[in-house]
Image: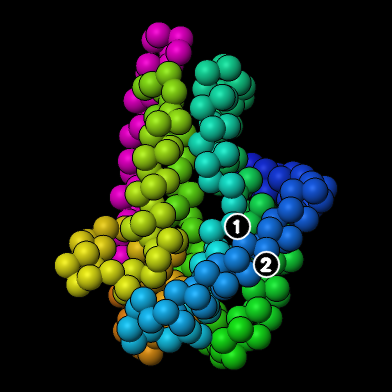
């Protein structure tokens, strides 16, 4: 019961902060279509020069419309840096002394930020998707997509959370952030839809969790998928969520031992 109250209070508090931070919200809302139009022009030029054979323009433009919407939902990199600062400044002691779950508070901050962003940015994304691709997903497809997109985003959050916690073991995590960001951009489909890579690479992508964060949920909107496809993706997402959550708990508990023992 206490955990639920903490979750509720943390969510409401951060929700108010997210609504009050109008400049950041405006920047995201303005930046989304601005970046998107640059991608549109780039890909229209690429496709006109037939750099990728057999690729439909509506699919590529629709893919980036949705993927960029998901990418901008939350400042994952900044969150990892904030966690590092709280560890090195000793601010994390405030959570420990008051027995406040550090992970829960961060998760609720994520949830509130995403809620506000979704309320304002989702209509823009839906309208742009219809204008550019003439694709208007039916209600059921939209709901299933939102479930996969939400779980994929949670998986992404947990990995960035772990990267922040690695600060228990190292003085600086910027190198890890840079390396992982490059890896995630390629393997999640943020830079290029994964089905445009050679088949050998796609076999590797299937074994890794990164595609579940972005490519698989987005592709669900455009590919002819069945309920069996949906549940197989759902199962994989839940599996990787459990794995990464277990890793985060391990890193947190062992990190606290170093924190109390050596005063990092």
Residue in view at x 39 percent, y 10 percent? 261
Residue in view at x 38 percent, y 43 percent? 180
**Residue 177: which quarter of the image?**
top left
Q: Is residue 157 above or below residue 220?
A: above
For the record, the magenta segment spans 236-264
Residue in view at x 43 percent, y 18 percent? 171
Is label 2 in a helix, a strand or a loop?
A: helix
What residue does disc 2 label?
Answer: 33
Q: Is residue 206 visible?
A: no
Residue in view at x 45 percent, y 74 percent? 46
Is label 1 in a helix, a strand or a loop?
A: loop
Horizontal side of residue 105 vs 221, given as left or right: right
Q: Which disc number belongs to residue 137?
A: none
Q: CA distance from mark 1 to mark 2?
A: 14 Å
Instruction: Decide whether the magenta segment is chiefly helix, strand or loop.
Output: helix
Of residues 61 and 234, the one nearer the viewer is: 61
Horizontal side of residue 228 vs 109, given as left or right: left
Q: Position of residue 142 (x, y in %)?
A: 55, 81
Q: Is residue 117 above or below residue 143?
A: above
């Amino acid at each position: 019961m206490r955990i639920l109250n903490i979750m509720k209070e943390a969510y409401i508090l951060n929700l108010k902060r997210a609504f009050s931070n109008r400049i950041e919200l405006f920047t995201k809302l303005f930046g989304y279509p601005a970046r998107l139009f640059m991608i549109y022009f780039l890909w229209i030029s690429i496709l006109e020069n037939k750099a990728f054979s057999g690729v439909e323009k509506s699919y590529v433009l629709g893919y980036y419309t949705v993927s960029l919407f998901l990418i901008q939902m939350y400042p994952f990199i900044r969150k990892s840096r904030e966690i590092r600062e709280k560890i090195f400044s000793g601010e994390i002691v405030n959570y420990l002394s008051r027995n406040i779950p550090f992970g829960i508070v961060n998760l609720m901050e994520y949830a509130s930020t995403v809620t506000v962003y979704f309320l304002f940015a989702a209509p823009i994304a839906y309208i742009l998707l219809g204008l550019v691709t003439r694709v208007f997903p039916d209600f059921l497809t939209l709901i299933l997509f939102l479930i996969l997109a939400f779980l994929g985003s949670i998986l992404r959050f947990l990995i960035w959370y772990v990267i922040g916690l690695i600060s228990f073991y190292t003085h600086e995590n910027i190198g890890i952030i840079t390396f992982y960001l490059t890896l995630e951009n390629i393997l999640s489909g943020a830079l290029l839809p994964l089905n445009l890579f050679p088949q050998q690479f796609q076999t590797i992508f299937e074994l890794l969790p990164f595609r579940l964060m972005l490519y698989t949920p987005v592709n669900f909107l455009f590919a002819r998928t069945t309920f069996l496809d949906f549940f197989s993706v759902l199962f994989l997402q839940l599996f990787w969520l459990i794995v990464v959550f277990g890793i985060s708990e391990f890193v947190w508990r062992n990190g606290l031992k170093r924190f109390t023992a050596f005063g990092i």
